[in-house]
Amino acid sequence: MGKIISIANQKGGVGKTTTCVNLAASLAATQRKVLVIDLDPQGNATMASGVDKYQVDATAYDLLVEEVPFEQVVVKKTSGGYDLISANGDVTAAEIKLMEVFAREIRLRTALAPVREKYDFIFIDCPPALNLLTINAMAASDSVLVPMQCEYFALEGLTALMDTISKLSAVVNADLKIEGLLRTMFDPRNRLSNEVSDQLKKHFGEKVYRTVIPRNVRLAEAPSHGLPAMYYDKHSAGAKAYLALAGEIIRRSEIEANNVSSEKIEA
């Protein structure tokens, strides 16, 4: 059964979409079956996947609100080698329309239930706000991956996000947990970055990924070409970092699966 991971942070500009697209492409390159769900009305993950958000026949809006079958909404051909549920401005209307429907917080969970076993990983690119779209993402997810810059205000935002996850787990998804904290746009020459990084490791321990995503021009350029960094410049520091992160996530998932199997045998 596929692992569903929301990529979320209430603070904007921390590398959520960059992480979603590049991590998905890196995992797809290892022959994993991957799905990306773009829940941000800006449609940046859609465009970065080589899909024109203005030309798509159906989006996350159709999946969530109109209950169009998954197979009629999914885009199979992306530049990153993964499947995609796209987004554009229509998804903004989903926020309003969902207020009117029954079981509005679990529409995405319900839509994914029949297909999640077809994928190894499902990543949800969340909007930078706590709204019904984000709540749907977290209600459907096993865990939350939090990209964050190592700066002063990031710690404040992280505290707020942890509080949000705690509240949501109590209401819509008791099994929701933190998948990991990812340091993005990292500059090792910056003293504050190193201090915040040390604080993160001190407070969250193994939840902080060993992989660090550097500030990298190629990572910033790749979306404008509709490509993940590994297909834009595979030798770039950014592309290599996301491949390393993919390896780390695979290892963690394998350890997790082995632990679950051991617990079942003991029971």
Image (cartoon, grey):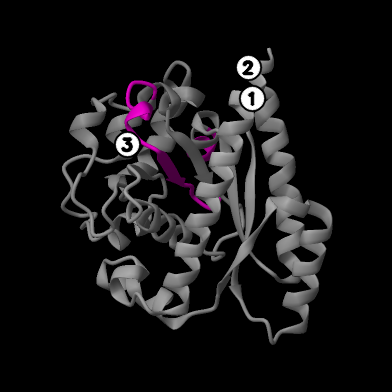
Q: Is residue 173 above or below residue 246?
A: above
Q: Residues within 10 Å of mark 3 (few under 14, many from 20)?
A: many
Mark 2–mark 1 distance (CA, rounded to whole Å)? 5 Å
Which residues are drawn in magenta?
113-135
Q: Is residue 15 above or below residue 101?
A: below
Write down the quadrant of residue 156 in the picture.
bottom right
Mark found first going from the N terminus, 3 or 1: 3
Secondary structure type for disc 3: helix
> Closer to the camera, 113 or 93?
113
Q: Is residue 116 above or below residue 126?
A: above
* Identity, as a three-letter code, of the amino acid under mark 3: Tyr
Marks 3, 1: nearer the viewer = 1
Residue contact between numbered discs 3 and 1, judged by CB atoms under 8 Å: no
x 51%, y 35%: residue: 132
Report the residue marked by disc 3: 61
Q: Is residue 52 left or right of residue 136?
A: left
Residue furthest to the top in view is 267
Report the residue marked by disc 1: 262
Q: Residues within 10 Å of mark 2 (few under 14, many from 20)?
A: few
Write down the quadrant of residue 39 in the picture.
top left
Report the residue marked by disc 2: 265
Q: Is residue 66 above or below residue 79?
A: above
> Where residue 176 appears, x then y in whole percent?
62, 32
Secondary structure type for disc 2: helix
> Closer to the camera, 208 or 258?
258
> Closer to the camera, 218 or 131?
218
Instruction: Say if the magenta span includes residue 34.
Output: no
* Identity, as a three-letter code, of the amino acid under mark 2: Ile
* Identity, as a three-letter code, of the amino acid under mark 1: Ser
Secondary structure type for disc 1: helix
> Where residue 226 appears, x then y in whole percent?
26, 66
* Numbered label attached to residue 107: none
